């Protein structure tokens, strides 16, 4: 049986693959789930043709850390930081999370995932610390599955209580039952609490479990004052830092700890918007660039942040420039180079794929890789005329430009609309769950 062929025709193609280059006008041929050819004037007589004139065609964005279950808590904590009595931990983690039923986690995940797809994100790491019961796990995996996205399910321990006595057993069972192969859209990672939230011994045991299960690790470190106590350094000295780990935030780590991450081949996820507004510390973009490590980017939490990668790209790029200009104005010399639009678009795609352990499958448009492709409208009044396609994506576009989204060759959004989503049903279930969670927790929504 021959696979279905799709020809995306006459687009401005940003492959982001340096060997192939980018094209002002070219075609992308998809066969089944994979890209089979890229170049001008491809012929494929039997293929379904998608007209991409007036479109930028590029790899889908990759988000490397998001607590997707919080989808029904959108914008609930924008004026809440890591500090004070009513802080992000006491409200989101200790008040709202504990009353989530499996169905609330499911619908939270579903609205988060559809929002991400709508914004042109094709791969997401779901940092899912809502695993109060075994049923919660099944519920969020069901949502990940239904969404059609490429996702890393990063199993997170609940933060508001001690892990259940069966937690480890559940993790082993899920790894075996749902993730026995890596050759599928959903892959598995462990999201341990990490040494700043739990003891060294517990952190070590959780990391060892991930390695026994051949799962990548995704961990928050260097967060606020908890990150200033050398706890990651202790893990490093014990030989626990390896190239299978993505370190999130890293804002208050010491120089030695940053170097340990680089030296052991780790990857990094920065959520510069939440890091800056919530008090995690200064995003360490330059500290990693100084070592030649380019971080990936992430949304983190929709309780506080918008759900798209355009915001993340602009935030981290602005911050890096501001820090260099600040030093320049203070009379410093021999300053590092500015990040360019090309650098930052690669952070949102290639580095994301690398951090999620999926660079062999996604992150660039390359024949042989999976067809995770977005098409961005260039005829819209917010972006025409396009003078520099890469800068247009990084600085000029927003989610309204996302016309089409394909994951593994399957169209999930076309002509500006999500496909196969019952939005009325999604909306009513999201409000139902939101109302239940708010009422049960006793939390009061902000006055307006
Ligand atoms: Zn986080």
Image: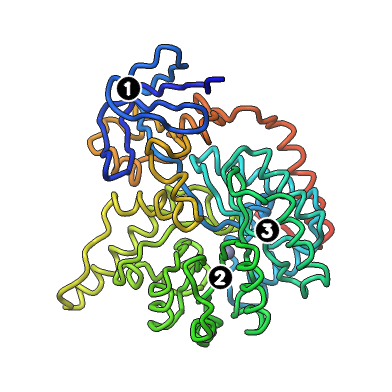
Q: Residues within 10 Å of mark 1 (few under 14, many from 20)?
A: many
Location of residue 251 by image quarter: bottom left
What residue is rendered at 47% in x and 35% in y? Answer: 371
Residue 105 in sight in this render: yes
Determine which of the numbered discs, if any, sits on residue 10 in the image. 1
State the image coordinates of residue 279 (x, y, percent, origin top left): 51, 73
Ligand 1 closer than 8 Å to the CB at disc 2?
Answer: yes
On the rendered structure, is 344 left or right of 75?
Answer: left
Q: Are marks 2 and 1 in contact (CB under 8 Å)?
A: no
Ligand 1 closer than 8 Å to the CB at disc 1?
Answer: no
What residue is rendered at 64% in x and 39% in y? Answer: 147
Alpha carbon of mark 2 to alpha carbon of mark 1: how far? 43 Å
Residue that label 2 marks: 220
Helix, strand or loop at mark 3: loop
Helix, strand or loop at mark 2: strand
State the image coordinates of residue 383 (x, y, percent, origin top left): 33, 34
> Is residue 220 or residue 312 the one in the foreground?
220
State the image coordinates of residue 235 (x, y, percent, origin top left): 54, 82
Q: Residues within 10 Å of mark 3 (few under 14, many from 20)?
A: few
Location of residue 332 by image quarter: bottom left
Residue that label 3 marks: 446
- Decide which of tag 1 and tag 3 comes sooner along the chain: 1
Alpha carbon of mark 3 to alpha carbon of mark 2: how far? 28 Å
């Amino acid at each position: 049986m021959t696979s279905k062929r799709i020809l995306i025709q006459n687009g401005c193609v940003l492959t982001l693959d340096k060997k192939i280059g980018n094209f002002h006008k070219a075609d992308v041929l998809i066969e089944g789930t994979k890209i089979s050819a890229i170049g001008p004037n491809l012929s494929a007589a039997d293929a379904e043709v998608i007209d991409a004139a007036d479109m930028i065609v590029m790899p889908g964005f990759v988000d490397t850390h998001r607590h997707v279950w919080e989808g029904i808590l959108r914008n609930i904590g924008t004026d809440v930081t890591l500090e004070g009595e009513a802080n992000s931990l006491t409200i989101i983690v200790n008040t709202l999370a504990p009353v989530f039923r499996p169905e609330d986690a499911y619908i939270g995940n579903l609205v988060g995932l559809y929002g991400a797809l709508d914004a042109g994100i094709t791969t997401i790491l779901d940092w899912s610390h809502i695993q109060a019961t075994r049923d919660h796990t099944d519920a969020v995996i069901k949502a990940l599955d239904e969404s059609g996205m490429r996702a890393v399910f990063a199993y997170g321990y609940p933060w508001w209580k001690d892990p259940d006595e069966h937690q480890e057993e559940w993790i082993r069972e899920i790894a075996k039952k749902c993730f026995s192969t890596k050759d599928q859209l959903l892959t598995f990672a462990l999201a341990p609490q990490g040494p700043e939230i739990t003891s060294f011994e517990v952190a070590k045991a959780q990391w060892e479990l991930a390695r026994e299960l051949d799962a990548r690790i995704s961990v928050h470190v260097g967060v606020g004052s908890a990150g200033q106590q050398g706890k990651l350094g202790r893990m490093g000295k014990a030989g626990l830092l390896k190239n299978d780990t993505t370190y999130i935030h890293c804002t208050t780590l010491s120089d030695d700890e940053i170097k340990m991450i680089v030296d052991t081949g780790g990857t990094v996820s920065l959520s510069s918007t939440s890091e800056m507004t919530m008090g995690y510390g200064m995003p360490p973009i330059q500290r990693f660039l100084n070592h030649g490590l380019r971080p990936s980017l992430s949304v983190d939490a929709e309780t506080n942040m918008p759900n798209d990668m355009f915001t993340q790209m602009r935030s981290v790029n602005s911050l890096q420039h501001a820090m260099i200009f600040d030093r320049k104005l203070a009379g410093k010399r021999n300053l590092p180079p500015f990040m360019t639009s090309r650098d930052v678009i690669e952070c949102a795609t290639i580095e994301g794929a690398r951090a999620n352990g999926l660079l062999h499958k996604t992150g660039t448009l390359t024949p042989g890789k999976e067809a995770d492709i977005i098409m961005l409208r260039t005829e819209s009044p917010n972006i025409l005329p396009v003078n520099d396609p890469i800068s247009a994506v990084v600085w000029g576009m927003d989610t309204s430009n996302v016309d089409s989204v394909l994951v593994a060759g399957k169209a999930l959004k076309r002509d500006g609309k999500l496909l196969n989503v019952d939005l009325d049903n999604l909306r009513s279930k999201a409000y139902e769950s939101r109302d239940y969670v708010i009422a049960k927790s006793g939390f009061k929504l902000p006055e307006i």
